Amino acid sequence: MTQLATARWPGIANTPRTPLKARIAKSILQPTVNRVPVRLTFADGTSWGAGSPGSPEMRVVRPKAFFARLGADTKIGFGEAYMAGDWTTGEGTDLADLLTPFAERMSTIVPVPLQKFRVFVDKKLPHAQRNSVEGSKKNIEAHYDLSNDLFAQFLDPTMSYSAAWFESAEQDLESAQLRKIDGILDQAGVTEGTRVLEIGSGWGALAIRAAQRGATVTTITISTEQAALAKERFAEAGVDVDLQLVDYRDVTGEYDAIVSVEMIEAVGEEYWPTYFATIDRLLAPGGKVSIQAITMEHHRYLQTRNSYGWIQKYIFPGGLIPSLDAIDHTLAEHTSLAVTDRRSLGQDYARTLREWREAFNAHWETIHAQGFDETFRRMWEFYLAYCEAGFGVGYIDVFQIQIQRPDAHTSKEA
């Protein structure tokens, strides 16, 4: 490791010294891998796994460090070991393809008798990552304010950082992102004259599309970097959008349509009641809401909602994925709203993530020149591939969810 890497990535540069835990991790991993159609190979020629010669290969470069990280922190150590270069993919193996068999078996990969020890493995979410008004700003800045130029290297021209919605295998990412945006706007009933509130501006693509429909658009964000570029994009598109640097809890007014794309994951379970109650307070009579939300099955959400993982440590501090049941329950308990329609874009997200990762790798030299180092590259590659595998096998999903007041929906149907 270089001195720069040591200063920037102390948890990666310094290998944990946990010989007993390392031996335990090794004793658990071997029988686990032997049930998965992959090959885990070592420099001495030994190999584990149930895979054939053509199966995805995981090459353990530094076994001692790999097992030490896995033993020290099971949930975080695997990703950290990839960041450190303790393991990598074999020649011709795509990282997402390697992670997919593990994602398919996520619920059963740990033997049932050992699952009762989960309480001793899971770390609780750090208090510092609570999504209070101050905490939310810090959490958002940690990811979205990295660099607009970084995101421009792998996102499509709309700068949409969420699942696209592909109509066909031939459709390109940009038009699939516009289709996704139109799906949200249609679900929220946005037409000429609609008063629209967008919670979470991103880099402005949805606000631009809504304004082009003739809507009166207010969009809010707490990311100063995103806001600066979004304003430039509004000017280039020739649209009038009211962009406010404000937390969702502090918004006032009344809106016919409220939209929010992959924002709820950054809200935190503690604040879901506040988030949805705020939407309820701001929604005009007869209005519609459309949110795009990453979800997981309810039993998985219950198992993981209080645990701290690699994604939260390195990518999305304060992040938590809800279940559809959790959303329904929060709406019922804290609002006058209910879900009235939804559609899944899970497989579309897997494809979106693969295209992002391919673009990220293709433009790595430009990204590297912006000041991002090799550890960052491996972190970002693992993040994109890890998520792609999860969506690809359905371990996680993403939905466009329409929400209304049931009386308004019923009267319209009648």
Image (tube, grey):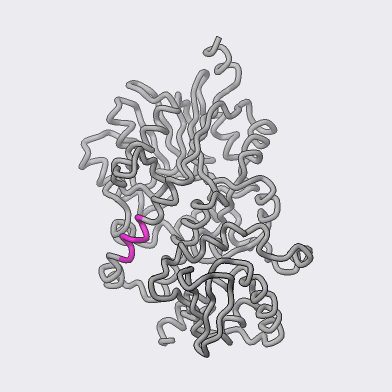
Residue situated in front as seen by the camera: 228 or 377: 377
The x and y percentages for residue 296 are 60, 47
Which of the 4 quarters of the picture holds residue 407? Answer: top right
At horizontal 49% and vertical 66% (from top left) the residue drawn is 98
On-image quarter of the N terminus: bottom left
At horizontal 42% and vertical 41% (from top left) the residue drawn is 220
Q: Where 272 falls versus 196 (above or below)?
A: below
The x and y percentages for residue 238 are 21, 36
Count of labels shown?
A: 0
Magenta part, dominant SS: helix
Confirm whether residue 138 shows in the render. no
Residue situated in front as seen by the camera: 262 or 361: 361
The x and y percentages for residue 126 are 63, 63
At horizontal 68% and vertical 36% (from top left) the residue drawn is 329
Q: Where 146 falls versus 193 (above or below)?
A: below
Residue 178 is inside the magenta segment: no
- Judge from the rendering whether residue 105 lies leftward or rightward of residue 228; answer left or right: right
- Judge from the rendering whether residue 166 lies leftward or rightward of residue 300; answer left or right: left
Which of the 4 quarters of the picture holds residue 154? Answer: bottom left
Confirm whether residue 55 shows in the render. yes
Which of the 4 quarters of the picture holds residue 218? Answer: top left
- Judge from the rendering whether residue 64 lies leftward or rightward of residue 203; answer left or right: right
The x and y percentages for residue 254 are 47, 26
Residue situated in front as seen by the camera: 264 or 118: 118
At horizontal 44% and vertical 28% (from top left) the residue drawn is 187
Q: Which residues are magenta?
A: 355-361
On-image quarter of the C terminus: top right
- Residue placed furthest toward the top: 414
